[in-house]
Amino acid sequence: MISRFTSWTIRLLFSLCLLLVMTQPWAQQPPLRMALIPYLSPNVLVPLFLPLARQFEKDLGRPVELFSAPTIRSHVERILKPDFDIIFTAPHMGRLSQLEAGYVPIGSFKSPLKGVVTIRKDGPIQKIEQLKGSTVAINDRLVLNSILTLQELEKRGIKPSDLKLVPAASQNSAILSVVAGSVDAAITVNFALGQVPKDQLQQVRVLFQTDDVPSMPSTLILVHPQMPKETQSRLAASLLRFAQTDEGKQFLISSSYSNVVPVTQTQLKNLDIYIPELRRLLAIKPGAPHQ
């Protein structure tokens, strides 16, 4: 039989635990909702960014939930509403969300921003001129590396209409389509190559890549315009601190980014030259032929 003293002690401990739970910041505040651009397949993307979410949780004392979208287009449509507390996205999409929805940039994952064309090492295409008439996997015409690459190919006499563009669910799946031999080539961002298993990566090579664009951020992390300034500052500090942690260093290796850096107003304005094309592509209905 439990003694009266022991029973009273248990009730007291239970009450103290309940009080502790009720006074925790996580119990009082709703989760922060963070949107991730679906440039990788969900089973790769969400685990990759989970350490960053945990860093934000630790520094802000409230949970962070990660969200992706089924397509790049739906991602852009969602971040323009604005429905999310934090967004990680492509630079020109982040700039558009800043201009139209008021999102506030707090930093960038740094990496050389290059569009690449990948082919099989043992495939029939060996020169860039041979791309004409070929099937090319592309994640989405909306992403900046697609815009950059198609523009550069056109300068070399290869128009988008000369290619049979095949939609790919993600950047890494576009490269895997080349490995499987279901397409002749893939257009992706350079750091997507780091998300392909090494044994499969050995079966492809880069046929062409665009020049680096150091005057622009390669990614953008932004926060909701109505987020309190103090919370914005804490998130920005947490983001920069993340790169110095063991988890953050491993994230940078796994994601093929080199660092976490602030973003300048000049860098943001340099993205404006891509906004008209992004708006034009957004106005085209899904499934309609692209010119």
Image: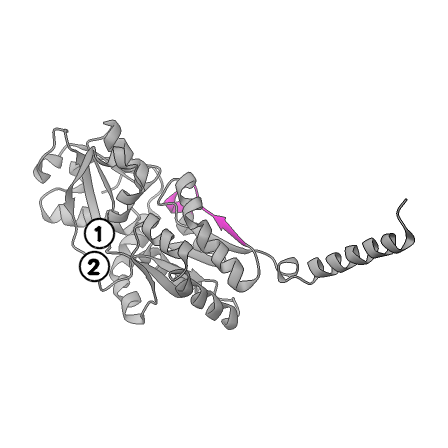
Q: 149 or 196: which is nearer to us?
A: 196
> Label 2 to label 1, Cα distance in Å?
7 Å
**70 in magenta:** yes
Q: Which residue is mark 2?
A: 213
Q: In the image, what residue type sits under mark 2?
A: Val
Secondary element under disc 1, as helix, strand or loop, is: loop
Quadrant of residue 12 in the image? bottom right
Q: Residue at x 24, y 61 (%)?
A: 273
Query: Which quadrant is home to the C terminus?
Result: top left
The residue labelled by disc 1 is 114
Decide: few, some or many residues near mark 1? Use Cα within 10 Å; few <14, some 14-19, many ≥20: many
Q: Specify the quadrant that holds the N terminus.
A: top right
Q: Are marks 2 and 1 in contact (CB under 8 Å)?
A: yes
**Residue 82 appears anywhere in the view:** no
Q: Secondary structure at mark 2?
A: loop
Q: Which residues are magenta?
A: 64-74
* Residue 129 visible within the image: yes
As drawn, 265 above or below 95: below
Q: Where is residue 116 drawn, in percent x and y?
A: 20, 45
